[in-house]
């Protein structure tokens, strides 16, 4: 039969492993958010991403503090973020023929998927820590991070449709202008080539 000290070691090991798993996702999220910040074409979305990047860096620090407090080693590894991947043939088509506006809509949807997945992961982590009867400070740390992830996800869910509509409407208007300009240029060419 296991001794109480063995049981608390196992609980601590599981808690540290779970915190490191969360940290690995935040490590990956920093890279994703930095990339999105450099590519984002919508000012208000860019500002929100910048804010969430700062939050994510703080989340990393909070997770590292809890891992240290529990006597664990901090991971620098990066987890795999849940970004849907289309089949290769469709991916090539999207990458080769999508406009910046279309790519922005696509990536904003991926942002939302990631934030919702992170919230699910933190809810599960909190439940696991409660079952393990982990210290309250660690649970409170995860609850704070969960609220931040949910807030950004809620903002994305509310604003993605409006942003997508605005970007796609602008793209359609720009395409109509381009076609009209081309038609005028073609007509001018016809008039220039017809002898007077």
Image: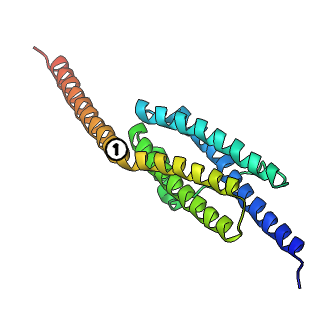
| Residue 31 in view, yes or no | no
| Residue 49 in view, yes or no | yes
As drawn, the residue found furthest toward the left would be: 196
Residue 64: image location, x then y, percent: 75, 47
Quadrant where the N terminus is found in the figure: bottom right
Answer with the quarter of the image where residue 180 lies. Answer: top left
As drawn, the residue found furthest toward the bottom would be: 1
- Name the secondary structure under disc 1: helix
In-image side of 25 versus 44 (left or right) = right
Residue 98: image location, x then y, percent: 42, 44
In this view, 124 is above or below 92: below
Q: Residue at x 80, y 50 (%)?
A: 69
As drawn, the residue found furthest toward the top would be: 196
Towards the viewer: 118 or 141? 141
Towards the viewer: 105 or 27? 27
In-image side of 107 versus 70 (left or right) = left
In-image side of 2 versus 164 (left or right) = right
Q: Residue at x 22, y 23 (%)?
A: 185
Residue 192: image location, x then y, percent: 19, 17
In this view, 186 is above or below 8: above
Towards the viewer: 54 or 125? 125
Q: How many marks?
A: 1
- The residue pinned by badge 1 equals 164
Q: Residue at x 43, y 37 (%)?
A: 100
Quadrant where the C terminus is found in the figure: top left
Label 1: how many Cα within 10 Å (few below 14, some 14–19, many 20+): some
Residue 53: image location, x then y, percent: 58, 38
Answer with the quarter of the image where residue 117 lies. Answer: bottom right
């Amino acid at each position: 039969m296991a001794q109480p000290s063995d049981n608390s070691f196992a609980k601590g090991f599981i808690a540290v492993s779970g915190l490191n798993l969360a940290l690995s996702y935040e490590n990956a999220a920093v890279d994703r958010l930095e990339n999105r910040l450099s590519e984002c074409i919508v000012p208000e979305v860019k500002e929100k991403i910048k804010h969430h990047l700062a939050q994510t860096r703080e989340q990393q620090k909070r997770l590292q503090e809890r891992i240290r407090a529990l006597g664990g080693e901090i991971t620098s590894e990066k987890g795999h973020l849940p970004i849907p991947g289309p089949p290769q043939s469709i991916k090539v088509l999207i990458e080769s023929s999508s406009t910046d506006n279309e790519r922005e809509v696509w990536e904003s949807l991926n942002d939302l998927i990631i934030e919702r997945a992170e919230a699910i992961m933190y809810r599960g982590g909190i439940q696991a820590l409660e079952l393990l009867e982990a210290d309250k400070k660690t649970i409170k740390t995860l609850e704070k991070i969960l609220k931040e992830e949910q807030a950004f996800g809620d903002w994305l869910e509310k604003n993605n449709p409006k942003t997508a509509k605005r970007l796609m409407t602008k793209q359609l208007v720009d395409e109509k202008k381009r076609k009209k300009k081309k038609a005028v240029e073609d007509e001018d060419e016809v008039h220039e080539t017809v002898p007077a």
